[in-house]
Amino acid sequence: MPKNRHTLLGLGLLFLFFLTINGEAYDPAELACLDNEPVWSKTEENVFLPENEMELLLASEKLPVSAERSDLITFANVNASLVKSWSGAYQLLFEFSFNDPRPFGLPYNFQYIEVNWSVNGKSKTQIIDWTQECHGPGRSMFPGQRPWNVTITLEDSKEKPVFKFIKMQLWGSRN
């Protein structure tokens, strides 16, 4: 009988593991831990890299305390660039920084990022959920902490694509 208990326990843990790594796309509004509105949103239309360029800055913005308090701006910053990697892939590079001149205090929590784009008549979506479907607080960054990057591959093509639109949305807040 003890072997059956271990087998059932093992199957139960395996079920929980697969339940927590479910990679399906889901609507941010369904996640109770996120605000209804993103803390930052930016849409660019007809985006392409100029000839002989490897990077195009799309946005550089300071983030508000939260979506509800968009009037209170923090020193948390997001840069978004379209880059062409050496392999030929076109990627969206996000750089997050928090250069508060008073490097003490509460962190900024980055919870969720969603990117929608259209290229060659096809619309695509990529999501990064740092809260793991609300099982964690997200990716925290303290004032003065070293910047970090996230890269999302948009198009892996030898031809130079023109993106009809790129819509970037970020959820997060200063705790």
Image (cartoon, helix red, strand yellow):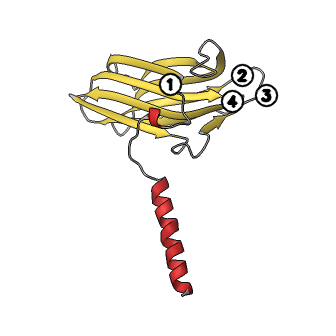
Q: Which residue is mark 1?
A: 38
Label annotation for residue 100: 2
Label annotation for residue 175: 4
Which residue type carries mark 1? Answer: Pro
Residue 123 quadrant? top left
* Residue depth check, mark 1 versus mark 3: number of the one nearer the observer: 1
Which residue corresponds to the image point at 53% horizontal and 36% vertical from the top-left? 32
Q: CA distance from mark 4 to mark 2?
A: 15 Å
Q: Residue furthest bottom?
A: 1
Residue 65 quadrant? top right
Q: Which residue is mark 3?
A: 104
Residue 85, given in percent of the width and then of the height, sits at: 39, 35
Which residue type carries mark 3? Answer: Phe
Q: CA distance from mark 1 to mark 4?
A: 15 Å
Q: Nearer the viewer, residue 110 or 56?
A: 110
Q: Is residue 99 above or below residue 113?
A: above
Neighbourhood count class around disc 3 (C-alpha, 10 Å): few under 14, some 14–19, many 20 upward: few
Q: Residue furthest left?
A: 121
Residue 3, given in percent of the width and then of the height, sits at: 53, 85
Residue 25, given in percent of the width and then of the height, sits at: 38, 42
Q: Is residue 152 above or below residue 80?
A: below
Position of the N terminus, as image quadrant, is bottom right
* Residue depth check, mark 1 versus mark 2: number of the one nearer the observer: 1
Residue 134, given in percent of the width and then of the height, sits at: 55, 42
Mark 4 or mark 2, earlier in chain: 2
Dot 2: element: loop
Neighbourhood count class around disc 1 (C-alpha, 10 Å): few under 14, some 14–19, many 20 upward: many
Mark 3 or mark 4, earlier in chain: 3
Which residue type carries mark 2? Answer: Asp
Mark 1 or mark 3, earlier in chain: 1
